[in-house]
Image: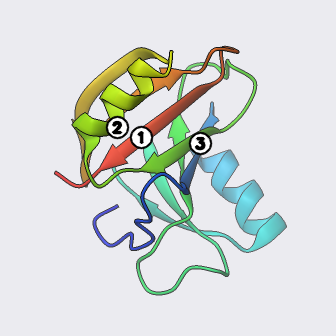
């Protein structure tokens, strides 16, 4: 996500779709919607739809042994990850993963009071 330029704090910024077969998923989304992909190793591929320009990405395909949780992972952007983590916790969110580093920055995952999992990312 180094060239990802949306970066509007606390807006929906990126969607990750968990898949069990990376090639089959790329074939499906490529044929169905014309999406293009950038490989980041064997387990992750960035998604470019018709709306993205240059190297921007709308989301990614994340390889997993099974699909759980019932849907894509919504990621929000933060210009201050620690402040956002504190705000999520103070509002009653439960941190379930991170903060951790990934190519392009740092992020954490949380669940809201209803149990929905979302993530927040920031540049390093």
Q: Nearer the viewer, residue 106 or 54?
A: 106
Where is 2 relative to 97, above or below?
below
Q: Residues within 10 Å of mark 1 (few under 14, many from 20)?
A: many
Q: In terms of sequence position, does the residue under pointer 3 or pointer 1 come before the other?
A: 3
The reply to whether residue 42 is in sight is: no
Q: Residue 27's spot in the image, x, y percent?
A: 70, 58
Q: Residues within 10 Å of mark 2 (few under 14, many from 20)?
A: some
Mark 2 vs 1: CB contact within 8 A: yes
In which quadrant of the rendered view does residue 5 lie? bottom left
Q: Give me the C-alpha separation between circle 2 and circle 1.
A: 8 Å
Query: Which residue is drawn at the image coordinates 27% and 41% (left, top)?
Result: 81
* Residue found farthest to the right: 32
Q: Which residue is mark 3?
A: 74
Label 1 SS? strand
Q: Residue 38's spot in the image, x, y percent?
A: 44, 64
The reply to whether residue 86 is in sight is: yes
Q: Nearer the viewer, residue 12 or 26?
A: 12
Q: Residues within 10 Å of mark 3 (few under 14, many from 20)?
A: some
In which quadrant of the rendered view does residue 35 lie? bottom right
Q: Nearer the viewer, residue 65 or 75?
A: 75
Discs 3/2, front: 2
Q: In terms of sequence position, does the residue under pointer 2 or pointer 1 come before the other?
A: 2
Label 2 SS? helix
Compared across the picture, whether 102 is left or right of 42 comes to left
Q: Residue 84 shows which numbered tag?
A: 2
Discs 2/1, front: 2
């Amino acid at each position: 996500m180094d060239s990802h330029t949306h970066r509007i704090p606390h807006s929906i910024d990126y969607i990750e779709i968990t898949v069990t077969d990376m090639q089959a998923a790329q074939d499906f989304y490529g044929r169905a919607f014309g999406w293009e992909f950038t490989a980041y190793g064997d387990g992750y591929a960035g998604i470019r739809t018709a709306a993205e320009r240059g190297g921007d990405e709308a989301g990614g395909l994340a390889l997993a042994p099974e699909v759980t949780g019932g849907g894509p992972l919504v990621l929000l952007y933060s210009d201050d990850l620690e402040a956002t983590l504190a705000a999520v916790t103070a509002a009653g969110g439960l941190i379930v993963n991170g903060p951790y580093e990934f190519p392009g920055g740092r992020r954490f995952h949380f669940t809201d009071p209803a149990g929905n999992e979302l993530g927040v990312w920031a540049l390093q």
